[in-house]
Image (tube, rainbow, N blue to C red):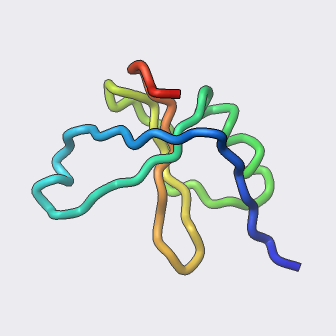
C-alpha cells in the first residue's frame, strides 16, 4: 500500500513574493493553508519531516517539508488577501 497522501482543493492561487532566491534563478513553491501550526501538527505526528521551523517572512508564516526523492516544498499561512 502506498504512503502517498492526496490533498484535494477546489481552487488554487499562485502567489509570488520577492526574495533573495530570485537572483539564484530558483523558484519556491508553497502550499497555502489557514493555520500553518495546526496544519503541521498532523503530518509531523505521522513521520513527515519538516525541514525548517515555522518562520515569519512578513508576508506570511512559512515552513518546508521534505518530499521523498523530490526535494522540499513550502507550506505557508499567508497574511495577504488571497484569491480563494
Horizontally, residue 16 falls left or right of residue 25, namely: right
Identified at 15% across, 62% down, the residue is: 24
Query: Which residue is most to the front?
Result: 10
The N terminus - image quarter: bottom right
Q: Is 83 left or right of 66, judged from the image as shown?
A: left
Q: Which of 39 and 31 is in front in this view?
A: 31
Q: Where is residue 4 in the image (x, y as percent from the top left)?
A: 75, 69
Against 49, residue 71 (above or below) is below
Q: Is 36 on the left-hand or right-hand side of 78?
A: right
Q: In which quarter of the image is residue 36?
A: top right
Residue 51 versus residue 12: which sits nearer the camera? Answer: 12
Residue in the image at 62% along x and 27% along y? 35
Picture mark count: 0
Q: Residue 46 at x, y = what percent? A: 80, 56
Q: Is residue 49 visible?
A: yes
Relative height, residue 14 to residue 68 (above, below): above
Q: Can residue 52 be seen in this view?
A: no
- Most foreground residue, 2 or 63: 2
**x, y percent for residue 40:** 66, 42
Position above or below: 39 against 6? above
Using the image as rendered, state which of residue 33 and residue 51 is in the foreground: 33
Amino acid at each position: 500500500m502506498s504512503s502517498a497522501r492526496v490533498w484535494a482543493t477546489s481552487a488554487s492561487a499562485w502567489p509570488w513574493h520577492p526574495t533573495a532566491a530570485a537572483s539564484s534563478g530558483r523558484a519556491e513553491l508553497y502550499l497555502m493553508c489557514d493555520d500553518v501550526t495546526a496544519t503541521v501538527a498532523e503530518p509531523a505526528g505521522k513521520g513527515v519531516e519538516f525541514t525548517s521551523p515555522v518562520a515569519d517572512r512578513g508576508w506570511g508564516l512559512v515552513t518546508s517539508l521534505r518530499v521523498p526523492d523530490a526535494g522540499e516544498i513550502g507550506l505557508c499561512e499567508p497574511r495577504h488577501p488571497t484569491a480563494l
